[in-house]
Image: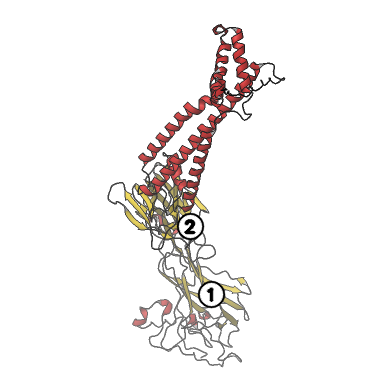
Amino acid sequence: MSASRTVLPPPPPERPLPKRLAGPGELIDQHSRRTRRQVKWVEIFQGLLVLTVVGLAVLLGATMADHWLLRGGLPDGARWAIWLVWAGWSIGYFWVKVLPLIVYRIHPLYAAQTIESARPSLRNNLINFLLLRNDPRWAPEPVVQAVEESAARELVHLPPEGVVDRQPVIRWGYALVVVLAILALYIILSPKSPFVSFSRVLWPWADIPAPTRVRIEAVQPGDTVAPRGEPVRVSAEVHGLVEGEEVLFYYSTADGQIVRQAIPMKEDQPGQGKYSLPMDSFIARQDTDYYIQAGDARSRTYHIQVDIPLVITAERLVYEYPSYTGLGRAEVLGQGDIRAIEGTRVTVHASANQPLSQAEIDLDGQGRWRLPMQIQGQSATGRLQLRLHPEDPQRPEYSSYLLRAQTLDGRTNPRPNRYMIEVLPDRPPRVSLRLGVLEETPEEIDLPRSRAVEIHVEAEDADFGLRRVGVRLQRQGQMLDVPWLLDWKGGGGARGGGSGDKSSPVPASDSAKGKPEGHQGLFQASWQFQPAKLGLKPGDVVVYWARAEDTKLPTPNVAETPRRRIVIVEDPPGQPPPEGQPGAQAGPGPQAPGAGQPPDRPPKEPPPDQQQQNPQERQGPGQPQTKPESSEPAPAGKEGSKPQAGPQGKAPSEGSQPEQESGQPPPEQQPAGPG
C-alpha cells in the first residue's frame, strides 16, 4: 500500500529590492509619505462633499416648505431656526472633520494601518517596524532589521495608485449629483422662485418676502418721510398676475382710526406691469404703515413718517400809495393778494411755523425775479412796487408772487402759496372842446383878423385830479405862447391862464391831509381866441386843440381833443371895428354885435332866466342860432363854404346880450351893420 503525498509548489523566489533603493527603510518611508498624502486629500474631499450635499439638501427642503407647507412662507422664527441648526452643524463638522486634515499632518502609524488594511499579508510588520524604529530599546537590532525587510518585501507588491479606500467619496459624489438633479428640476418646474427661498434661508436677518406666483418688486417710495398734507406717490412693479386679479394698496394710520384701508392701484401702461396709486388718492396726515398685495403675493410693510413741512404765509400788507393820490398809507390784515393803483409800494409781512434762515418774494413764481426779505425769527418782511407791463399797459408787470423760505436746517417750503397781484392803472383824464354855442365843432372855420371866438373847455380826471388844462395853438409847426387855463403848482392851488379865461375855482391841494393833488371834479373854462392879439395875419392857419394832464407822477396821463383849424381872413369891408376896441370881438357876420355902439349907452340887461345861466353859455332863451344879418354880401368863394365865428363864438339874436368879459366896459348896443 503506497501512501500518497501532496506535492507543494516551490515557494516563489524572493523578489529582490530595486537597486535604486538604498534599503528597505527608505522604501517604507516612500510608501508611508504617499499614503499619508492620499489619505489627507481623500478625506478632505469627502468632508467637503458631505458639507455640500447636506447644505443643498437643507436648502431644498427649506425651499419646499417655504413654497408649499406654510401659507405666506416660512416665518422669521423658522428661518432663524433652520439657519442656526444648519450653520451650527456645518461649522462643527468642518471643525472636527476637515480643519484638522488641513492644519495637521497624517500620522505615519495611521498611514501604516491604512496600508495593512489593504495588504493583510503584512501581519502588522509595518506598524511593528515603525514602533521599533522609533524606540530601539524594545528589540535588538537584528530583529528590527528582519521586520523591516519583511515589510519592505510586501510593500513592493502594492499597486501604484495607492491603497486608500475611495468608495465613501464616490458614494457622496453620487449623492451630490442626485441632489443637484432634483434641485435643477425644481427650479425649472416650480412656479415660484427657489432662489428667493434660498436667500430667505441663507440670510434670515434680511427682510425678503416669501416667494409667490405673483412678484411684487421695486416698491416706491418704500420707507420714507413725507410732508404732512402732501400726496404720496406709491408705485410698484407687479408680474405674474392672472386675469381678474387686482393690485391693492393697504395702509393703517398710527392712531388706529384707519386699519388696512384698501385703495386699488392702476396700471400706468397696459402690459408694462407698472402700477401706481391714482393722483392725490393717498395724502399723508400722520405716520402710516402700508403694504401692497396682489394675487398670492404681499410686499413687506413699509413705514411713512409724516414731517411737519415749512409753511410761510402773508399775514399783513402795508400799502404806501403815490403822494399825488392823497390816499396815504393803508394796512390789510389776513390777506396776501395785492390790489392797488400803479406806483404803490407794498410791504409784505409774512410769518412761518418754524425759524427761518432766509426768505424771498418770487415774482410770477418762476424763479427769475426774486426780492430778498428781512428775517427775524419766524417773521419775514419784503417790499415791492406795483407797475404795469411796459409792453402791455393793460396788465401788471407781475401777475402773482410766491413766498419761498428756508429753515435753519436747510429745508424749504415744498408748496408755497400763490398770491395774486392786480395793478389798477391810473386812468387818463377826459377833455372836450366847443366853439361858442355851436353844437358840433367844425374841422375848419374862417375868422376875420379883428374878430374873436370863444373856446369852451371841459376836463375831468376820473380817479384823482387835474394838473393842467388849456388850449394849445400851433402855426406852421410852431407852438404859440398861450397860458394854461389850469396850472396846478403843488400846494398853491390852481393858477389861471390870465386874461381872457373864465375858469371855475380850484381848491388848494393838501396831500398830507389825505386830499389828492390837483383839481378834483369837473373843470370848465372859456378862452377867447383873438387873432390880432396873437399877432396873426390874414392867411395864417392856426391848428388848435384842448389838452388835459392829470397829477400822475413822474409822467402824467394826457388827453387831447382832435386837432382843428382856424383860417385867419381879411375883415369884411366896412365891418372891422377900430383895433383894440371891445367891438373887435367879432361874430359871424359883417359886423359883431356892439361894433360902433355909443359908449354912453348902457347895455341891455338879459332876461331873469338868463341871469342864472353860466356866463360862459348865456344865450337868449329859446332863440335859435340864426345867421347874422349883413349889409354886404359875403366875400366871393366863401359863401356857404365855412362857418364864421360870431362874437365870442355866439350867434346874435334879437333881444340878446352878448357875453362880456370881466374887467372890460360893456359896449353900447347898436344894430349890427352900418347905420
Of mark 1 and mark 2, the one earlier in the sequence is: 2
Task: Say left or right for 75 vs 533.
Answer: left
Say which of 559 and 302 sits in front: 302
Q: Is residue 367 shown above or below 119?
A: below
**Colour mapping used in the image:** secondary structure
**Residue type for callout 1:** Trp
Question: Does residue 288 appear anywhere in the picture?
Answer: yes
- How many numbered badges does the structure rendering display? 2
Placement of the N terminus among the 4 image quadrants: top right
Structural distance between the alpha carbons of marks 1 and 2? 43 Å
- For residue 595, the mark is none
Whole-percent x, y for residue 347 in the image: 42, 51
Say which of 575 and 615 sits in front: 615
Identity of the residue furthest to the front in this view: 1
- For residue 364, the mark is 2
Identity of the residue furthest to the left in this view: 257
Quarter of the view holding residue 512: bottom left
Question: Does residue 359 appear anywhere in the picture?
Answer: no
| Local secondary structure at mark 2 | loop
Quarter of the view holding residue 525: bottom left
- For residue 545, the mark is 1
**Residue type for callout 2:** Asp
Q: Residues within 10 Å of mark 1 (few under 14, many from 20)?
A: many
Q: Are marks 1 and 2 in contact (CB under 8 Å)?
A: no
| Local secondary structure at mark 1 | strand
Say which of 404 and 302 sits in front: 302
Say which of 168 and 305 sits in front: 168
Whole-percent x, y for residue 540 in the image: 62, 79
Whole-percent x, y for residue 199 in the image: 45, 43
